[in-house]
Image: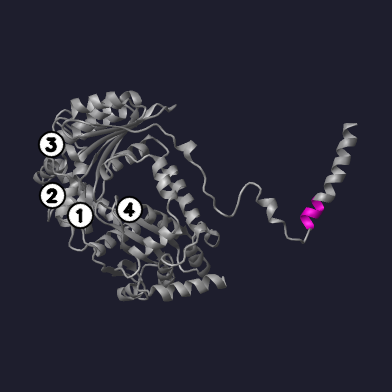
Amino acid sequence: MAAAVAVRSKRRLLPHLYRLLHSTAAPSPNRFLRHASPVPRAADHSPFLRLPAARVSTLPTGLRVVTQSYPAATRMASVGVWVDAGSRFELPGTNGTAHFLEHMAFKGTERRPTANALEVEIEDMGARLNAYTSREQTTFFADVQGRDVPAALDVLSDILQHPRFPQQGIQRERGVILREMEEVQGMMEEVIFDHLHTAAFRDHPLGDTILGPTENIKSISKKDLQQYISTHYTCPRMVVSASGAVDHDEVVDQVRKLFTGFSTDPTTADQLVEANPAIFTGSEVRVENAEMPLAHIAIAFKGSSWTDPSSIPLMVTQSILGSWNRSIGVGNCSGSALARGISNGELAENLMAFNTNYRDTGLFGIYTSAPPDALHDLSRLIMEEFRRLAFRVSETEVARARNQLKSSLLLHFDGSTAVSENNGRQMLTYGRVMPFLELFARIDAVDCDTVMKTAKEFIIDKDVALAAVGPISNLPELSWFRSQTVSDDKFTSRVFSLFAQNN
């Protein structure tokens, strides 16, 4: 009986499969859109964003403590110290001190006299201790089991308050940093962005590299390191951030007991920035190297500061421009019009829009690498896309950009390390931790009119900074790039409107 039913079912099914596989009629799009749509839609993310609130306490010294506790099966935690000091705050002639200090912090203290003693203690806990320096901030952090948070805080407070800076260690670290500099020279993206900062902020510390020049690395002294700490590692400019398996009150008590040796000088980073603001110069750095197979180029405009109201519209605009790499092979399917144009025209190997924020300024633009014979056409396409953002942006691409931006933000916060870093950075830049619900509401408030208004403010008739390395003889002059930002509103709007009607 069962066999007979199976045979009848098979007879009914086979003609259907044959028609499906051999039909010449175009398939109905509705069959493929039951659960998805090619048109991006705004979704309510609030059920997924009700994360435990961050708690903040400020000690009498001005030192701030922020924690975000949440249950984790691994019982892991991250704790770190975020300092409102980076390479832009270095004295003339001492560029590289902030980064050198980051290296020397792990070379021993009065209680832990050698780097080996410190490493053994960290490894015995199964922990990870790390640090990094940027142009405006320096960070020291540890990933540990929840039960070892007090020990991690003890280590962090010790290496920042009682570093030994042995002369032999300083000499050894010079060689380490010089080798690091050689490695960085092989990373073209790092090289280009260092050149771009030089072009954008000439004769200002923000335009200097983080590692510093070779002559400084060879001459930085123990006195320079001690002076940098005493001047910039002050309680009002420091935040202790912890997340994961942590208890706020316990962390605050621990910090109150341990972090007692820092200056309470009330001078803030904002005051130092106001005394020496960064001026966008709009110049260029070109390094011709005909032996390189690809030209590496960064084109940038002055961007927004962290707290500028335009910072989030620029984030959405960055998402519209998008990123693309030929090795991925989805250029003509990309939501980015620029990526589709570059892919179809085979004009470049990769593309990355960027939006970098600082306390008083920023950089907004595009980095790309391309074969030398495509540089002129590629430059034309990029500048046309920049201009288009000011006059013709669809609500569909803005909605897609908003969704992509929110997804990338959520994907970044995938553990206690990222949460701790985000909270520490936001406390330094905003003075508070912005909840995801608020951040996403601000992103969702950006529509196509906001994007076009922002593009007119930051792109049209604005200076351009340019950095280029490689076989760049075919790259247009800086004056040409600047001329491509000049636009008559009525004429350009009419041209783009006619283009939209014909497409």
Q: Which amino acid does label 3 sit on?
A: Thr
Residue identifier under label 3: 264
Element under disc 2 = loop
User: Could you say which is closer to the camera, residue 219 or residue 73?
Assistant: 73
Residue 384 in the image: x percent, y percent? 43, 70
Residue identifier under label 4: 309
Residue identifier under label 2: 220
Residue identifier under label 1: 212
Disc with the residue nearer the chain's start (3 vs 4): 3
Disc with the residue nearer the chain's start (1 vs 4): 1
Principal SS element in the magenta part?
A: helix
For the image shown, how many numbered marks are present on the structure? Answer: 4
Q: In this view, does 280 lie to the left or right of 266?
A: right
Q: Find the magenta span and give its range.
A: 17-22
Asked if residue 19 lies in the magenta stretch, the reply is yes
- Report whether residue 298 is seen: no
> Crowding near pointer 1: few (<14 within 10 Å), some, many (20+)?
many
